Image: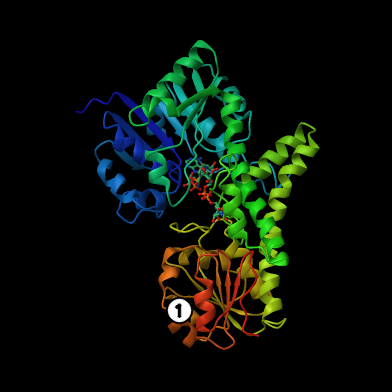
Amino acid sequence: MTMFSKKIACIGAGYVGGPTMAVIAMKCPQYKVDVVDVSEARIKAWQTDQLPIYEPGLLEVVKAARGRNLFFSTDISTAIRESEIIFVSVNTPTKTFGEGAGKAADLQYWEKVAREILRESKSSKIVIEKSTLPVKTAQTMENILNANGKKIRFEVISNPEFLAEGSAIQDLLEPDRVLIGSRETPEGLRARQEIVEIYANWVPREKILTSNIWSAELSKLVANAFLAQRISSINSISALCEKTDANVQEVARAVGMDSRVGSRFLNASVGFGGSCFKKDILNLVYISESYGLNEVARYWESVLQMNEFQEARFVRMIIREMFNTIVGKRIALFGFAFKADTSDTRESPAIHIARKLLEEKSHVAITDPKALDNARIDLAGSGSDADFLEDPYKAAQGAHAIAIMTEWALYRSLDWEKIYKYMEKPAFLFDGRNILDHERLFEIGFNVYPLGRPPLKHF
Ligand code: NAD
Ligand code: UGA
């Protein structure tokens, strides 16, 4: 039997748990990594080559370690008992009921896991917060775990994940930084060092940051809030550009070349989506309010308000420009994922926009290379006037307008002349991601509406 130098478990086999553990297992064949989840369907999928999530490069990493030192199962009890280190990466959605509804994190899954770890453990363990959590959650975790008569001790570590979907494997292999927060007691520091040693197998030491546990928890929320804030900032300027004949891409370039500002995350868009930006900002807002810091709360809340404004503004533009009515018109949405290179549609701006267009009694044709299954689920119950088509040319057939929702690279290389021929005239194109060659589309005959630039219209 192979002897492993560390036994690691991960509870939660989702977008974070799956890829993160696969990379640890690939990079550290000396460790045994057990990934467990309550969802049988998810675990089954992880055991096949039809993985439950689409992520470039993920299958290769999984295949390199699966069955060797990477195992997927629903046997949570055994995984807890047999491991020395437990990562917890279950979902932490926004609370939908009771106190803090719509803002606070719903920690029921989290607490359930803590109690399960306590029930099953027969020896001391390090428990790692991998999920994104409100600052001070580690305290609750410690209180639950260490209220035991078993004479075993749990050290709680915060090791938030910064990967982005679509580039998860790259982000995990070459992270900007890894953050590990702990209590600054001798036991806490020892546990912190154990986790540092895991990442040091492939991450340069200078990129492994250590901090106190509250800084680590808070840094994760703040990192997401800052990223989302940049998008809301440039989106607010896109609205102003449309009124002033400035071009938001030129403005973003000029501003972003200041090395103090930096050029990334300044692409104006129809709005940011994804499972975390909104949830984590709401969390920050709720925590600030709970400490009586109302100005701080309002400041961060405005980032979300700007995002809603951008989505609403986009729909209003479509209706206005299409002669103030879209009843019975076919509108093709190109892309449904919240960003390119993922099948994930959580909080995708496309969901809100599709619903609004359906409310206006238009007929919506949705195309996406990876996210159609999720799109069907998201729009179930929003009326039957939606078509889901793999082929973008078919989605465009007979359409009055196309709206780009996701920045899939393939949309740049479509045969736009052919698409133009398929469409009703006048043909409208609303580029919610500014990814297409607007001048060329205008020459073909489209009326083109970029974001944050004057439209190119034939009338
Ligand atoms: P997810 O919904 O994809 O996965 C969570 C998994 O946990 C699910 O498969 C669910 O079945 C499982 N689970 C829930 N309760 C359980 C329990 N009691 N026992 C065992 N399994 C249980 O979520 P995700 O996107 O992986 O996010 C997880 C956490 O990581 C969240 O806190 C999120 O904020 C954070 N995060 C996500 C990303 C991302 O890109 N998605 C990036 C960084 C951080
Ligand atoms: C984001 C962060 O980038 C990760 O660091 C973090 O770990 C993760 O959230 C999380 O905590 O879940 P993710 O949501 O996967 O990652 O994707 P991003 O690349 O950040 O994009 C988020 C949204 O912003 C997308 O809808 C994207 O299209 C949009 N976006 C991004 C813009 O509209 N403009 C930009 O310039 C950049």
**Quadrant of the rendered structure where residue 236 is?**
bottom right
Q: x and y percent of residue 51 in the render? A: 36, 53
Q: Nearer the viewer, residue 450 or 443?
A: 443
Q: Residue at x 24, y 38 (%)?
A: 68
Residue 81 higher or lower than 248, as above or below: above
Q: Nearer the viewer, residue 207 or 301?
A: 207
Secondary structure beneath dot 1 equals helix
Q: x and y percent of residue 263 in the render? A: 54, 48
**Quadrant of the rendered structure where residue 363 is?**
bottom right
Q: Nearer the viewer, residue 321 or 272?
A: 321
Q: Quadrant of the C terminus?
A: bottom right
Q: x and y percent of residue 107 in the render? A: 61, 38
Q: Nearer the viewer, residue 44 or 390?
A: 390
Q: Is residue 180 visible?
A: yes
Residue 224 higher or lower than 351, as above or below: above
Q: Is mark 1 within 8 Å of ligand 2?
A: no
Q: Residue at x 50, y 70 (%)?
A: 437
Which residue is at the far left? Answer: 1
Q: x and y percent of residue 70 in the render? A: 30, 38
**Quadrant of the rendered structure where residue 359 is?**
bottom right
Dot 1 surroundings within 10 Å: few (below 14), some, or many (20 or more)?
Answer: some
Residue 260 higher or lower than 369, as above or below: above
Judging from the image, the colouring scheme is: rainbow
Q: Is residue 124 visible?
A: no
Q: Residue at x 40, y 40 (%)?
A: 172
Q: Residue at x 41, y 78 (%)?
A: 415
Residue 372 higher or lower than 154, as above or below: below
To which residue does mark 1 refer? 416
Side of 79 where 314 appears, left or right: right
Q: Quadrant of the N terminus?
A: top left
Q: Amino acid at mark 1?
A: Trp
Side of 85 where 359 appears, left or right: right
